[in-house]
Structures are given as C-alpha cells and as structure tokens.
Amino acid sequence: MATTADFKNGLYLNFNGKPCMIVYFQHVKPGKGPAFVKTKLRNLENGRILENTFTAGAKIETIEVERRPYQFLYADESGFNFMHEETYEQISLPKDVVDNADLMKDGQHVEMMFVTAPEERCLTCELPTYVTLEVTYAEPAVKGNTATTSALKEVTLETGAKIMVPLFINQGDVITVNTTDRSYGQRV
C-alpha cells in the first residue's frame, strides 16, 4: 500500500479494480478545508483518461507492471501467437488485445505490457511507432487529379491493410507507416 504522498507521474495503481497509470497529478492545499490531490489516470486496458480527486493521505494499492519484448509468429483462429525474444516462451493473445493488428507481419517485434499480480495477464500489445511494409496494390496516379483533392490515394500493403499515401507511391514500393494514426511516413 502507498499513500498520495507517493504519487508521481508513471506510477501504476489499482483504481476501482482496473489497472491505471498516473499521467498527471497536482497537490492542492486550499485556504479552507483539507488538502487533496487532483489526478489524471490512464486506464491501461482501454487507454481512456480518467480524472479523480483523492484526499491527501488516502491509501492506494500499487501494482507491478512489466514490459517485455516479443516477436509475432503467426495468426490462427484462436488469435495471434507470439514468442518471447529472450526465453523463447510462446503465448497466444486474442485479437482484441492487439492494436493495429493488420499492420503486423510475420517476425514483427512488439512490446507487451503485463500486470504481474495477483495473476499475470497481458494488458496491451504495442507495435513500434513505425513499421516498414511493401505496397502490393496501388492505383496509378491520374494526371491533373491534384487540383481538387488532397493528393492522396488508397493502397493495399503486404499485410492486407489499406492506408492513404501520396500519389507518387507505386506498387512494389517499400514505405514506413506510423502505427499510432495509420499514416504514411516515408518511402524507403
């Protein structure tokens, strides 16, 4: 157990039965009444930001969170299968735990976040910020098509994902894709 005096950005705690991380906190001592701590917490299961006020000195339950490197092996009907890069232990995750799964190809390195107590379970599976993928299908650019549009076209990547890219990207090009907003990065 910890108290509000132990608050710091990045502290992991159990809030209403959900694993959360402190994003921001501020200790407030008003002129009248007891002190309190205003916080912004990120729910680690769904990424939502929650705001809560704790009374000064309130006891909170901290949790242990661990980040581990894994490598994507293959997908099957039960979900996605990964291998730990150091221990070679294999695990399977359901499809809803992996964000932007359609940008993940075989051999892709990912980072998983685990809660270690009371029972160990995977919270998130995150791809690197940028992944390198080959364009398997792209419509040819039409001359004069840039006057009224934003000069983007849809392409299909080797994993089957569809993203918007500039007109000069052609089939067979290798590009980087930002996994946070699914946007085009650059041509490799």
Image (tube, grey):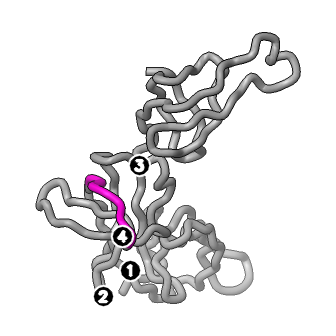
Q: Compute the Cα span from label 3 to label 4.
A: 14 Å
Please tell me which residue lies in front, 168 or 114.
168
Give amino acid for label 1.
Thr
Residue 98 numbered tag = none
Give amino acid for label 4.
Leu
Q: Residue at x 31, y 57 (%)?
A: 74
* Residue where numbered disc 2 is placed: 118
> Farthest left residue?
87
The mark nearer the N terminus, 3 or 1, is 1
- Contact between labelled residues 2 and 1, with CB atoms less than 8 Å apart: no
* Residue where numbered disc 3 is placed: 104
- Left or right of 155 in this view: 89: left
Residue 62 numbered tag = 1
Give amino acid for label 2.
Pro
Q: Disc 4 vs disc 2: which is toward the camera?
A: 4
Q: Which residues are magenta?
A: 71-77
Q: Is residue 85 above or below residue 81?
A: above
